[in-house]
């Protein structure tokens, strides 16, 4: 398996919604399909992606449940080939995330993603959120900001 890239929810969504940064995320997914990198994400990201697709689907002209199912199919395929890792959100991750909430004034959802990336020794934290990028860098993660 290749180097690990943690994709936050905003980065994952860029795979299915064309916007700034989508080409970079597409490149990572293509490399994962070839087995040269490993995409890391958590169960939290899956839930958040559902919210994003539901909330913005109509606005963006998407059939939200169809796009969500497409995302799940692709992520399952990458998991089967071991080109992706799905992180369980454990009590330990929540405890560590709460510390980041207070240290960086983040939403717990964002903190969970940073802690998950660190737990999985991700080489790179990929996000479309500039504020989250700042916090991930402050936590010692090499970060690619697609904002």
Image (tube, helix red, strand yellow):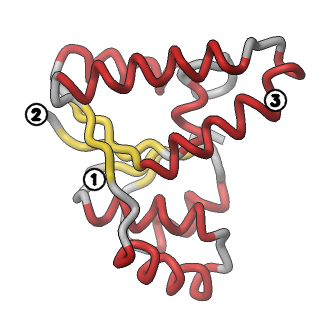
Q: Residues within 10 Å of mark 2 (few under 14, many from 20)?
A: few
Task: Kindly state the secondary structure of the residue where label 2 is placed.
Answer: loop
* 120 left or right, relative to 11: left
Which mark is first along the chain, 1 or 2? Answer: 2
Task: Kindly state the secondary structure of the residue where label 3 is placed.
Answer: helix
Residue depicted at x 21% and y 29%: 83
- Of the 4 image quadrants, the one containing the C terminus is top right
- Of the 4 image quadrants, the one containing the N terminus is top left
Identify whether 44 is placed above or below 49. Answer: below
Query: Residue 66, image x and y in percent?
Result: 63, 13
Residue depicted at x 62% and y 16%: 67
Query: Residue 145, image x and y in percent?
Result: 55, 46
Identify whether 1 is placed above or below 106. Answer: above
Res 32 quadrant in image: top left
Mark 2 = which residue? 1
Q: Residues within 10 Å of mark 1 (few under 14, many from 20)?
A: many
> How many numbered marks are there?
3
Mark 3 = which residue? 56
Mark 1 = which residue? 122
Residue depicted at x 46% and y 75%: 94
């Amino acid at each position: 398996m290749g180097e690990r890239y943690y994709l936050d929810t905003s980065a994952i969504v860029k795979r299915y919604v064309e916007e700034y940064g989508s080409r970079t995320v597409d490149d990572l997914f293509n490399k994962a399909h070839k087995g040269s990198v490993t995409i890391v994400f958590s169960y939290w990201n899956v839930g958040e992606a559902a919210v994003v697709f539901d909330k913005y689907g109509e606005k963006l002209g998407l059939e939200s449940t169809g796009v969500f199912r497409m995302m799940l199919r692709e992520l399952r395929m990458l998991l089967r080939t071991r080109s992706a890792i799905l992180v369980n959100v454990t009590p330990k991750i929540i405890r560590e995330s709460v510390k980041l909430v207070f240290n960086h004034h983040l939403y717990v959802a964002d903190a969970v993603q940073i802690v998950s990336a660190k737990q999985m020794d991700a080489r790179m934290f990929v996000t479309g959120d500039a504020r989250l990028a700042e916090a991930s860098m402050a936590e010692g993660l090499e970060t690619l900001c697609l904002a």
